Image (spheres, grey):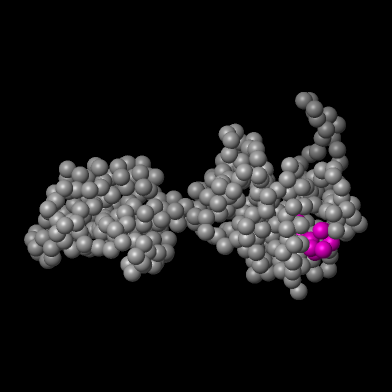
Amino acid sequence: MGRTVVLLVAAGSGSRTGGDLPKQYRAIAGKALLAHAIDHARHSAIDTVQVVIGEGQKAAYAAAVGDRPLPPPVIGGATRLESVRNGLEALAKAGDVARVFIHDAARPFVYLEIWDRLIHALEDAEAAVPALPAVDTMARGHGTLGDTVSRDGLIRVQTPQAFRFEAILRAHRAWGSEDATDDAQVARAAGIEVALVTGDPRLEKLTYEEDFARAEAAFAVRLVSRTGMGFDVHAFARGEELWLGGIIIPHDRGLKGHSDADVVLHALTDAILGAIAGGDIGDHFLPSDPQWRGASSSVFLEHARALVEAKGGRIEHVDVTIICEAPRIGPYRDAMRERIAGLLRLPLERTSIKATTTERLGFTGRGEGIAAQAVATVRLAEEI
């Protein structure tokens, strides 16, 4: 039958929101717009997402998509039409494509019902697009209001636009060099009848600063709080440096472990992973893996933070209790807070470090090691 591919066009080089960063790489809720678009291209019928990017955007693309399993991006052209055509030709070269959804990264929030409608429409049609009726008063205007225009029969066309692959490939090859507003226009010029399905207001294109502010606010409303707990313990050992909370503390012994054995950062990493139901530190950094021997535990904590951000979430507050008889934690508490706040990109006032003893009871009371327990509060966006 052939593959179903989402051709995601993200080749724009400018931003009407200001700054030099193309809008497809701008973050909403801690995640690039492009990443949101990729993550919303999910349906049992979709086999893969092929992204088209602009010249010189490979580094920004790599940072945005992270470790998502995608084919290498296609380099687009000077116009959207050229970028789409480059993407279609790359898919033709790869072969075995039956259906293609041509979509813009600036409309990232595609919901399951839209994919369902388009896939169903392609059973009987060669092309289908989502559309909404024009409900506002329509008028001409150039600085001042002119005559109204009847909105009867007017619609607002959105993306993704769905096509049988060979049909839209032939249409693009026959189109010529002039620009086109969208791919449905190219299809119609080739005599392809384009079916309409009901669109979604949430598919509106993000273009201006207020559009991004609206999207950010929508995510904030949907964020839900989760709490995770972590606990870790390491024994003292001679000849080791004592790392606690991301800093070295002068002491006659350090902690024994496969990495730098920073019990504070280990407990905190597990707390954050717990808040996102992400397993524990050993699932992500195997103790038997030699690459982590002596590694800085800051790597583990930054990884946990990145996982939260990849889910469109944010860390709200962390609280760590260090349990030991020695060394004294008080003189180093502020330095630890500053280090952890920096690693988690948190304000200092949302980073808490406390210390206590066990009144000389147990292994910490006997001075055999240090324990730490941590609590992390995370806000995550509900699935939409």
Look at 65% across and 38% down and name the residue there.
14
Q: Compare residues 1 and 86 and report the one nearer the observer.
A: 86
Q: Taking 128 as reference, is 5 left or right?
A: left
The vertical placement of 358 against 139, above or below, is: below
The vertical placement of 95 against 63, above or below, is: below
Q: Taking 275 as reference, is 77 left or right?
A: right
Any part of residue 200 in sight: no
Query: Which image quadrant for residue 272?
Result: bottom left
Q: Please say whether residue 164 is one of the residues in the magenta stretch.
A: yes
Give the residue at the far top of this rendering.
Answer: 143
Tell me where residue 205 appears, x and y as whole percent: 68, 46
Look at 13% across and 63% down and name the residue there.
368
Q: Compare residues 192 and 253 and report the one nearer the observer.
A: 253
Looking at the rendered image, the quarter that the N terminus falls into is bottom right
Look at 58% across and 53% down and name the residue there.
36
Give the residue at the far right of this rendering.
Answer: 191
Tell me where residue 180 appears, x and y as whole percent: 82, 45
Tell me where residue 67 appears, x and y as whole percent: 52, 59
Any part of residue 253 in sight: yes
Look at 82% across and 35% down and name the residue there.
139
Tell me where residue 47 appears, x and y as whole percent: 66, 67
Q: Compare residues 350 and 238 and report the one nearer the observer.
A: 238
Q: Taking 279 as reference, is 49 left or right?
A: right
The vertical placement of 334 against 245, above or below, is: above
Q: Taking 99 as reference, is 246 left or right?
A: left
| Range shown magenta | 161-169
Query: Which image quadrant for residue 264?
Result: bottom left
Q: Compare residues 282 and 353 and report the one nearer the observer.
A: 282
Q: Please say whether residue 297 is one of the residues in the magenta stretch.
A: no
